[in-house]
Image: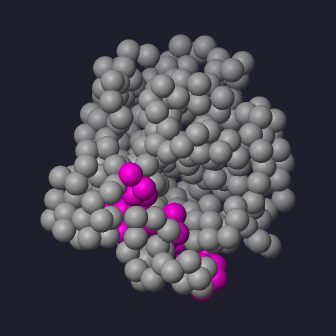
Amino acid sequence: MQIIQNIIYPRPADYAAVKKFSIALTERYPCLSLSSAGRSVLGKELFCLELNAGEPFRKRTCNSARSAPLQPAVLYTAGFHAQEWLTGSVLLKFVQELCRALETGLPIDGIDPRHIGGNARLLFIPLVNPDGVDLAINGLEAAKKHRDTVQKISGGDLSDWNANIRGVDINHNFNAGWQILRAKERSLGITGPSPRRYGGPCPESEPETRALTALCRKRNIRHALALHAQGEEIYWRYGRHTPARARLMANVFAAVSEYTLCDPEDIASHGGFKDWFIARFCRPAFTIEMGKGKNPLPLSDLEPVYSRIREMLMLATLM
């Protein structure tokens, strides 16, 4: 996959690399279109790649890409946390391989991509938190006008920074069990902007969170996946709103990846995108904790991590 190597290697994929790669993919594959789901605090686009599996060889116009908003779609997301930038690279690698498979008719892990179906659309957001990822990869200069705030919050040490540029953990900023989450934060001494785990002053206080929830409200998302790192675990349920088919899907995902089905603990048990999506729509959503080790996972983990979850990502297009 030369295009991945040219753009992302030999360094982590920051916002500029993801932008360049996303544009290159849409220029190469007619089945793919590129739009923006919204903007970050610093004004960076939350790139959304949309694949129309039913039209792999006909270039679509911007108007045709928006003409059927209620068609069922599967949503893949990554890059929620600054230190988990490898998730975006894994997701983009899957997009490229899937486009190539649709063009050639060659299977992925024995699955014929043409079985996805003519009405299915796949949405991919590789960087939900582009400001945070840039901060983790490129250092304090990436904070721009928020440099002094980031310096104060972090004490000059960005090695543990997972939040967006304002010190809000995007995956704690969704309206799911908000009061419980706030109580857990306070019990841990988290009362304001922090490198990680602060859920913000209120649900959806951050533009990145609002962009993702707005997309889900606008589109007919039948299920959603959120890539995180690390632990080789799958989180699949959230309270009484979890639909019955989520368990079946989770069991299949666990079987093909050999990941463990788990429930998040303590402060990680509320406020996440997966939690909000299940509670809001009563449809399946999954947090995939890919890989094992200490974040940030190294670039050398990209290939083995991807090969381990590729079949899971592929099956999600069909279920």
Query: In front here: 127 or 316?
Result: 127
Q: Main secondary structure of the magenta part?
A: loop
Q: Position of residue 92 (x, y in %)?
A: 45, 34
Quadrant including the N terminus: top left
On screen, 174 above or below 23?
Answer: below
The quadrant the C terminus occupies is top right
Q: Is residue 165 magenta?
A: yes
Report the magenta residues as a range.
Answer: 159-181
Residue 90, horizontal then vertical, whole percent: 50, 34
Q: Is residue 45 visible?
A: no
What's the residue at 50%, 68% (across, down)?
A: 197
Where residue 112 appears, as percent x and y from the top left, is: 67, 21
Depth order, front residue of 119/319: 319
Q: Is residue 32 left or right of residue 15?
A: right
Residue at (62%, 71%) from the top-left corner? 267
Vertical placement of residue 37 versus 291, above or below: below
Is 164 magenta? The answer is yes
